[in-house]
Amino acid sequence: MKQRLSIFLLLISIPLLLMACSFSVSSFSENLNKVVRANNDPQTVLQALPAYLVLLDALIESDPEDEALLIASSRLMNAYGALLATQQELMSVELEGEQYNYQRNIISRQQKKLSEKALSRAAKAICLYDDNLCNLTTIQYAEFVARLQSVDEDDIDMLYSLGISWASWLQVNSDDWNALAQLPQIKLIMQTVISKDETWDNAGAHMYLGVLNSLLPATLGGKPEQGKMHFEAAIRLTDGKNLMAKVLYAEYYARLTFNSELHKQLVADVLASSETQHEFILLNTLAIQKARALQISAEDYF
């Protein structure tokens, strides 16, 4: 049944995507992004996205130097990876033992493949966009800093897309110290975005910096108090409408610092929220699901 559904989605998508590419790939990508964000059924989105990923792969095969296609593919893979991550978290509540470990390993391998491909395509896209931004993931830090100093507001969209891909890659490789060594570059990208427009993507750069600064305790080089500042900025800048900022605040900062009262309050705030029709609907649906999982596991964690 799932296979037939995937084939059906692939077939009906072909004329739509080809039509969009005839006019504007970036316009189609933007519209698809809006539709995905406005969907309150994560499972449907999770089943539908692979069809679009395959279509974009086919189009990139025909035109591998099209930066709009590359960046659209990278963004869609990151969205799919994020949905897989949430599914993995929910499975920790629903499944146990060998069954959970088996499913977790499958999803983890898929996430790693997606994150590597998404980062590669974002890096290629930004290089095609501006020679000065080529090889950002491989150059020395001093040169990296120098290049980012020339970035202006027009470059933020491409730079932020690279930052998201890089951060997603880091999160699925957070057990690798070589990967963690690239944390300063990712942070600087997000800080650069904030310096140009801190409201970009609904304060998304603040949320990423909140997570990235809360990956490790202060004793191991983490900066959880800076993470707290960024989480609170994201909540403030979105007037509390972005529930994912609260969930990540609880999951990363409150748990890292063993602040059970803050964790309880943040989770309660999210679960008390009612679903509304706005641009945060998919994100907030996922946030509520994650909050329920955090509530269930809190007793064992604290």
Image: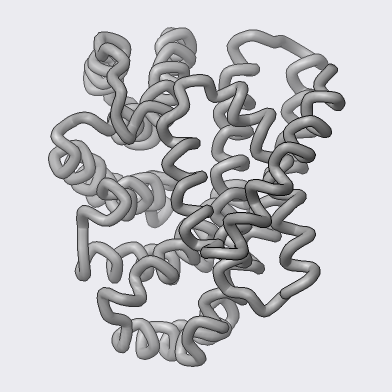
Task: Please tell me which residue is depicted at 48% across the width and 15% down the height of the picture.
Answer: 293
Q: Position of residue 17 (x, y in %)?
A: 65, 51
Task: Please tell me which residue is depicted at 61% across the width and 42% down the height of the picture.
Answer: 81
Which quadrant, please, contains the C terminus? top left
Task: Please tell me which residue is depicted at 25% across the width and 9% down the height of the picture.
Answer: 272
Q: Is any atom of residue 254 visible in this view?
A: no
Q: In this rendered view, identify the residue nearer to me: 294 or 216.
A: 294
Q: In this rendered view, identify the residue nearer to me: 60 or 172.
A: 60
Task: Please tell me which residue is depicted at 56% across the width and 83% down the height of the picture.
Answer: 128
In this image, 88 relative to 302: left or right? right
Q: Position of residue 92 (x, y in %)?
A: 62, 17
When asked about the image quadrant of residue 111, the answer is top right
Seen in the picture, residue 302 relative to 148 is either above or below; the reply is above
Q: Position of residue 224 (x, y in %)?
A: 30, 45
Q: In this rendered view, identify the residue nearer to me: 12 or 193.
A: 12
Q: In this rendered view, identify the residue nearer to me: 160 or 95.
A: 160
When asked about the image quadrant of residue 98, the answer is top right
Picture mark count: 0
Q: How is the image coloured?
A: one colour
In this image, 8 relative to 296: left or right? right
Which quadrant, please, contains the N terminus? top right
Q: Is any atom of residue 206 visible in this view?
A: yes
